[in-house]
Image: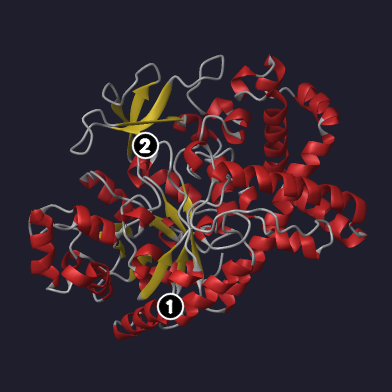
Amino acid sequence: MTNAGASIFSQRTSGVLLHITSLPGPYGSGDLGAEAYHFVDWLVSAGQRLWQILPLSPVGPGNSPYHSASVFAGNPMLVDLEDLMRCGWLSAKTDHGFESGYCDFERVSTYRMLRLREAWRGFLRKAHEPDRTEFEDFCAQQSHWLEGYAHFMALEERHGKPWTQWPAALRRCEPAALADAGVHLADDLGFYSFIQWRFALQWHSLREYANARGILIVGDAPIFVAHHSAEVWINANQYHLNEHGEPTVVAGVPPDYFSSTGQRWGNPLYRWDVMAEDGFSWWKDRLTHLLGLVDVVRLDHFRGFESYWEIPSSEPTAVAGCWRQGPGKPFFDELAKVQGDRAAQQLPIIAEDLGIITPAVTALRQACGFPGMRVMQFAFGDSPANPYLPHNFDAQTVAYTGTHDNNTTMGWWHTASAAERHAARCYLGPQVDTEIHWAMMQALSQSQANTVIFPFQDVLGLDGANRMNTPGMAYGCWQWRFSWNQVNDEPARRLANLTHAHGRNAPVLP
């Protein structure tokens, strides 16, 4: 973690939200190659200091990085293939034929995994001794998570089923069974470790490039993990599972204004009492690993650490759930120990406290010293006391026009109610009818919030066809990509002027 990570919230800064997969590039999805470096240069030209990404982990069902096979692993789709070509381990090919405007995850994943297999074979044949030694050192240093992840991926590929349907000894992670499987799967274990090695090298190079130019990376930590994941398979005793490894209770949120049946996410719930017995060591390992990759962490569904909605796994909806007490302040006091004997306030964490938030959740966030989030698309329609209106922000706020889960601001405006439009016109002025995105960005930028972050779609003024994710939709999400022909000089110039006018583009200080 850079020294600037923990102090960023006391300075006026501005940033852009863009996931890596949304970058341009010839291989079907954005990756850690040249286009990522070009985007860092664009951020600098626009006077920005933060680049917020979404989880770097492998995607799961629905293309979502929030349902990943591992919270430690990097997404293989993000590995820069041209780097492997420069190493001499991968042949150059130009017959991929991917369209530029979106990511077809199924095609892209199949293509890239085949190419990564080819690179692995090239590495085995051609790699020089320094590269082999570096790879071995990486595997040894990251063995606390990498061995389990590689076994999980290799076994999943072999059995083609969820881990709960593997042979009993493998399902239970019995050492003798894993050792025997490792003999037969040695090449696959090497392959999945090779991907993570190259991902780590490429990511650290990109992050160093960004940091050297005054750009900090804001990462993401989903609160829950996918049931079909290396973490749950390896640490089954830390989750509410039955003797067959299936969840007995699952995560979600209760019915509310937006949904009469709530949301049944389906993630297995933690046994917080068991995790507390060893000082939440898994969480400490997770946070340490993540802070080795990014400068600031957005902690998803912060309210779940105060209390969470527990749903019996037999229930098809979230209606029959109940509230359970979360780990609270002692949990964050333990997490702070990853930086030595320090207070939670010194953790570089943004608390995602959206939705129906109780006074107890706010009290926990304030006791931890974490800034909360405000989304301006939620601001219009009831009263001047609405907490999402910029005049109600305090300095310890991270303000957004929208997040990856919202429509673009232009898309929101086109679907907003008459009452919302009227409230927005009254608050923002007549500019909203032609440039609602810039009107909202200006209001946020001139607010007291120390941190403002704008989705790249809003900077470009793109409509709802360009939104990233629609919560509750199982298909068709996470596919958006931009191309540089959508980006002329105007957005960077306007954003730089806006940022400078409101004192947000001073260098981030240690």
Residue 279 is left or right of residue 195, and the answer is left
Residue in the foreground of this view, choosing between 136 and 483: 483
Q: Give percent across and percent down for residue 91.
A: 81, 57
At x 73%, y 33%, the residue is: 154
Visual colour scheme: secondary structure
Residue 471 placement (x, y as % from top left): 35, 42
**Quarter where residue 441 is shown:** bottom left
Dividing the image into 4 quarters, which one contains the N terminus? Answer: bottom right
Query: From what the image shows, is residue 222 above or below residue 167?
Result: below
Tell me whether circle 1 and circle 2 mark residues in contact (CB < 8 Å): no
Q: Is residue 225 above or below residue 286?
A: above
Can residue 381 be seen in this snapshot?
no
Q: Would residue 266 appear left or right of 429 to someone viewing this image? A: right
Residue neighbourhood size for the residue with mark 1, other residues' Cα within 10 Å, grouped as few (<14), some (14–19), many (≥20): few
Which amino acid, by three-letter code, is at mark 2? Gly
Image check: 9 left or right of 412?
right
SS assignment at label 2: loop
Q: Which residue is mark 2?
A: 326
Amino acid on which the number 1 mark rests in the picture: Asn
Front residue (pair 457, 69): 457
Return the disc, 1 or 2, that comes first in the chain's sequence: 2
Q: Nearer the viewer, mark 1 or mark 2?
A: 1
Q: Position of residue 487 (x, y in %)?
A: 44, 73
Q: How many marks?
A: 2
Residue at the image position 41 percent from the left and 36 percent from the top: 474
